[in-house]
Amino acid sequence: MIPFAYSRPGGATEAVEAVTDDPGAVFLAGGTNLVDHMKLGVASPTTLVDVRAVVGAGIEELPGGGVRIGAGMTNSELAAHPVIRRRYPLLSSALLAGASGQLRNMATTGGNLLQRTRCVYFQDVTTPCNKREPGSGCSALEGHGRDNAVLGASDQCVATHPSDMAVALLALDAEVHVLGPAGERRVPLADFHRLPGAEPERDTVLEHGELITAVELPAPLTEARSAYRKVRERASYAFALVSVAALVRVRGERVVDARIAFGGVAHAPWRARRAEEVLRGRPVTETAFRVAAEAEFAEARTGRDNAFKVPLAVNTCAAVLRSLTGVNE
């Protein structure tokens, strides 16, 4: 048994102060990721500061048509909420594609964004891992690499981000509300997760003591159709080899607007800006969909075991776009 202290603060500000003042303290919400890491020896916090009751756990409809989601809302509650199902079905689909019902009943919106990689070497404390121990090396570079990133990786880390929810939120242009020692700030989700670079141990732009309090979504894209598709090793309870979240708006026979995000291909949920740019104004055809997806992966770097991810991502993206626009193969 590794000893640790447990604290249940009376409010969000008190929680931030408790973690800020203790270098070994971390926030605890659903614990579906953190507790696993404590059992494995990957994480060994000195203090757990329970924030489940001090961050919001509901949905607030905003005047402009958007919504604010409390960081303490469970994945099950969020997926089933009538406002989310009606206005943001993409998010509901992504949530239901992730984990088991039991885990979704515990996992929170804020905690989901802070999931750490499921790279087998990160979770095995007997192996070198720059994310777990900076400077120790990356075992995945020469080891089992089927799940490795093909975009945005570095020679320090090739791990992928595991969240389904975050991929959908990225396509929906979500914004993260944060409370920290310096006060409140808002971070676009597109800027929230970091690529590994020379500091793979840093998953996000959060500083020690900063707490996610809410996630805000803008009003839905009008006249858009959306879908989330996840490709995995087995039908359920598996992390994505590749996933695609897409929203498309079509007028006549041309794409007016598109928002596309990929999961399973990078250290962070990956917004496909290049594919979106190529797709806008293009005719609604299979060829246009493939050209756009291939443009996104033109600079992909693959290894011995994961080269299949590029054609898989292209094919999955094209299939999603076909389903949204009614194009036949």
Image (cartoon, rainbow, N blue to C red):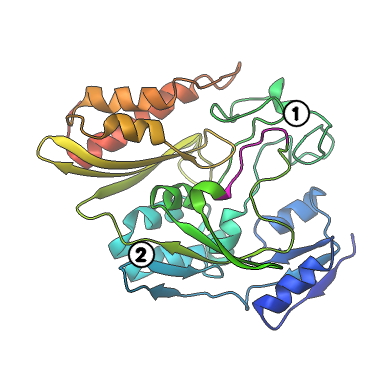
Tell me how far mark 2 sits from mark 1, CA to CA: 39 Å
Residue 196: say if magenta: yes
107 over 280 or under it: above or below: below
Q: Name the residue at 38% across, 69% down.
A: 81
241 over 191 or under it: above or below: above
Disc 2 crowd, CA 10 A, few/some/many (<14, 14-19, 20+)? some
Locate residue 3: give its quadrant: bottom right
Seen from this angle, which residue lies furthest left? Answer: 252
Q: What range is drawn magenta here?
A: 192-198
Seen from this angle, which residue lies furthest top? Answer: 304
Residue at disc 2, secondary structure: helix
Amino acid under disc 1: Cys
Q: Quadrant of the C terminus?
A: top left
Mark 1 sits on what residue?
138
**Does 240 sit left or right of 66 as displayed?**
right
Seen from this angle, which residue lies furthest bottom? Answer: 10
Q: Nearer the viewer, residue 216 or 166?
A: 216
47 over 244 or under it: above or below: below
Q: Are marks 2 and 1 in contact (CB under 8 Å)?
A: no
**Does 153 sit left or right of 64 as displayed?**
right
Q: Nearer the viewer, residue 110 or 121?
A: 110
137 over 168 or under it: above or below: above
Q: Which mark is residue 288?
A: none
Q: Name the residue at 58% across, 42% down.
A: 161
Disc 1 crowd, CA 10 A, few/some/many (<14, 14-19, 20+)? many
Q: Earlier in the sequence, mark 2 or mark 1?
A: 2
**Residue 5, image x, y percentages:** 85, 70
Mark 2 sits on what residue?
84
Residue 89: say if magenta: no
